Amino acid sequence: MDFARQLVRALEVPHTREERAPSDLQFVSSDDLLPVPIEERTWTAFSYVAFWTSTSINVGTWMITSSMIVMGMSWWQAWLTIWIGYGVMTPFVVLLGRPGAVFHVTFPVVNRASFGIFGSLWCVFNRAAMACIWYGVQSSIGGSCVLVMLRAIWPSVNNIPNSMPLSSGTNTRDFMCFLIFWIISLPFIWPPVHTIRHFFTFKTIIAPIACLIFMIWCIVKAKGVGPIVKQPATIHGSELAWAMISSVGICLSNLITLTTNAPDFGSRAKTPSAPVISQLLSIPLSYGLVCLFGVIVSSSSQTIYGEVIWSPVDLLGMFLDDDPSPATRFGVWFIAFSLIIAQIGYVMDARVAVIAHTFAGCDLTALFPRFINIRRGGYISAIVGLVMCPWNLVSSSSRFSSYMSAYSVFLSAIAGVMATEYWFVRKGHYNVADLYVTRKGSWYWYNYGFNPRAYAAYVAGIAINVVGFAGDTGRSVPAAATHIFDLSFFTGFGISSIVYYLLSRMFLVPGAADIFEEIDVSGYEEKMASCDEDTKSKDDSTEKESSTILI
């Protein structure tokens, strides 16, 4: 028993900030879950512009854009769809991130306000599992970039004999490259993000340059912009309309992770207004420009090779076929290297929403605050991302799109409940202190720590998309169910929002308000400031006493 107790103590995460918090706040909390300290709220409007510019540059976004060309759209139709998709999603990022920007709490804690202290654990687990999968998917894409880069240096890498079974879904060469990228990403999990901020600056500079060079290179090989612009769509009428609607849904799904976790990076805002206009402008603009590169490159591939190559990495690899010149090999190496940097940065963005806050790490911290901090959570997400065989998800355009759509079904229902709780039920009224206690009668205790209203709304938001999801996996379903699933974010978000609002009006929750006002009724920040002042006074008194004794 003594050994077991010592082992448990050794595995515990040291907590420092909660030791100076009031005693009733020391449960279901840790340093990573408490509100962000004032000195760490440093994000200005420019910080959010830089964050979204960096986040938008990744192969995954490029692949989503290119998949629209596979559906048969022309380049301008695909680009218009991109602007509509990300433009529509941006206000949701701002709305869901508002509690973080005002009260400086992260997603796992904000989720407690709607689902309950214990009820939030399922949503957090759901979100953490999704983040682990996303880590693996992005690492798999990064591995394909490693392969292209190695081929540019040593062409014989392409001929490594395969010793893996067909059932694995990969081969020795591709798995080796995946493992190389995965190992390279591990050291970036260890340090706090602000200590490697120069890496992100480097990514923000080199990745756009590489994307621009790649686009120009493809235009030159396609013999000018003319053939690309004149390339017509192969689908028309209602088929085109539903293809665009479906693609808008894919854009929404691509951003649903960051939308749900918007409180994570909102919590670092210097002022509540910092994330508003900056995000409303930077998100559609940055994704629109990056996706333009993907649209033109994918369209160019049809002119160059007679078929659409939906993966830009595969297209880059094709440049190395047929005995390329040294200049071509260097160009491919530089672009592939830049894409690797972009993918590492994107994996870090998926791990770190902001300075020292991770998606998977922060979510896992909320599940086991006693034993898991953000660093440990990051490594857990990396291990899960390895063992889940993510290369099977990105092996084809349709499979990747299906994964993204399924991703949206679950998170949109959670997001709908969270948004309605803040904006329409309690109308900006928060009790930050009660977010960290399990006391009966507290705002977020509900029924033994679970809010049945939220779970009823959550199930309703998922249920409306179940039949369409089955159709997306290959089952025969009515066309109406397929079209509903194409709008899975709106249907999931909308239904969960309506059900939660109606149930909250029928069965009132503590703190429900009639007037919108963003206020913390517990005065948590004032209490913490008072604790800091008392601690400082005691330290000063102790120092004076020590000086007197020495004299």
Image (spheres, rainbow, N blue to C red):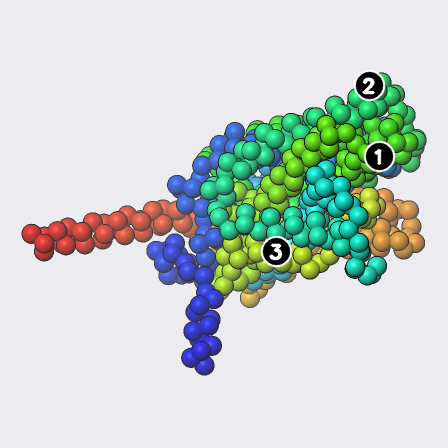
Q: Amino acid at mark 1?
A: Asp
Height in image: 473 above or below 158? Answer: below
Q: Amino acid at mark 2?
A: Gly
Instruction: Residue at 57% x, 41% y: name it.
Output: 97
Q: Is there CB contact under 8 Å for labels 1 and 3?
A: no
- First reached walking from the N terminus: tag 3 or tag 2: 2
Instruction: Residue at 52% x, 47% y: name it.
Output: 357
Label for residue 202?
none
- First reached walking from the N terminus: tag 1 or tag 2: 2
Marks 1/3: CA distance? Answer: 40 Å
Marks 3/2: CA distance? Answer: 44 Å
Q: Residue furthest left?
A: 551
Label 1 sits on residue:
322
Q: Residues within 10 Å of mark 1 (few under 14, many from 20)?
A: few
Q: Residue furthest bottom?
A: 1
Instruction: Residue at 26% x, 49% y: name it.
Output: 536
* Apparent side of residue 393 relative to residue 106 in the rendered image (left or right): right
Residue 95 lies in quadrant? top right
Label for residue 381?
3
Q: Residues within 10 Å of mark 3 (few under 14, many from 20)?
A: many
Classify mark 3: helix, strand or loop.
Answer: helix
Does the rendering let one see residue 498? no
Q: Nearer the viewer, residue 370 or 204?
A: 204
Q: Nearer the viewer, residue 165 or 532?
A: 165
Label 2 sits on residue:
224
**How far across and how far down the image is residue 409, in percent?**
74, 50
Does the rendering let one see residue 321? yes
* Apparent side of residue 301 relative to residue 111 in the rendered image (left or right): right
